[in-house]
Amino acid sequence: EQLLRLSEGGRSVSIPADVRRDIEKGILVRQLKNQINTLRDLVAEKENEIDGIKRDLKFNHLYELEREKDEYFREIQRLKTMVKDLKTELQREKQRREWNNKLLGANGGDELKKEVARLA
């Protein structure tokens, strides 16, 4: 009944101290509950934001790893090509030396002179 009078603007009624404290406590509890709910919502929002950032970081890390993998693959291909070219060049050099040795042979160049004469 006294609460109704307070809400109607009847401020002239004196309220016992213990009732007044109970009312203040109720108001405080309600405010604190609202504040807790607001903070819970804020925490949930921030957790979602953190999860999004973590996903972005994981994606970026995976993207970087993919780029590194591609770069290593290209380097491997380049080195394989270089090794193949070197092998081919070494094989040609070996064949040239064998041919020169064959032409020069034990005769000290007689075969080379014969080959030159034959080609001429």
Image (tube, rainbow, N blue to C red):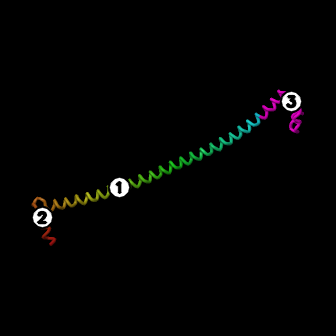
The percent coordinates of residue 11 (x first, y second) are 87, 35
Tag 3: residue type?
Ile
- Is 114 in front, or is 4? 4
Q: Earlier in the sequence, mark 1 or mark 2?
A: 1
Where is 2 relative to 73, above or below? above
Where is 59 relative to 22, above or below? below
- Is 13 in front, or is 86? 13
The percent coordinates of residue 63 (x first, y second) are 50, 51
The percent coordinates of residue 83 (x first, y second) are 32, 55
Tag 2: residue type?
Glu
Of badges 3 and 1, nearer the viewer stands 3
* Residue 9 is inside the magenta segment: yes
The residue at the point 76 percent across, 34 percent down is: 28
- Is 79 in front, or is 24? 24
The residue at the point 50 percent across, 49 percent down is: 62
Residue to which mark 3 is pinned? 15
Q: Secondary structure at mark 2?
A: helix
Spatial separation of the CA atoms under disc 1 and disc 2: 39 Å
Tag 1: residue type?
Lys
Q: Residues within 10 Å of mark 1 (few under 14, many from 20)?
A: few
Find the residue positioned furthest to the front.
Answer: 12
Residue to which mark 1 is pinned? 80
Q: Quadrant of residue 23?
A: top right
Specify start and end residues of the magenta stretch as a single range. 1-27
Q: Earlier in the sequence, mark 3 or mark 1?
A: 3
Where is 107 relative to 48, above or below? below
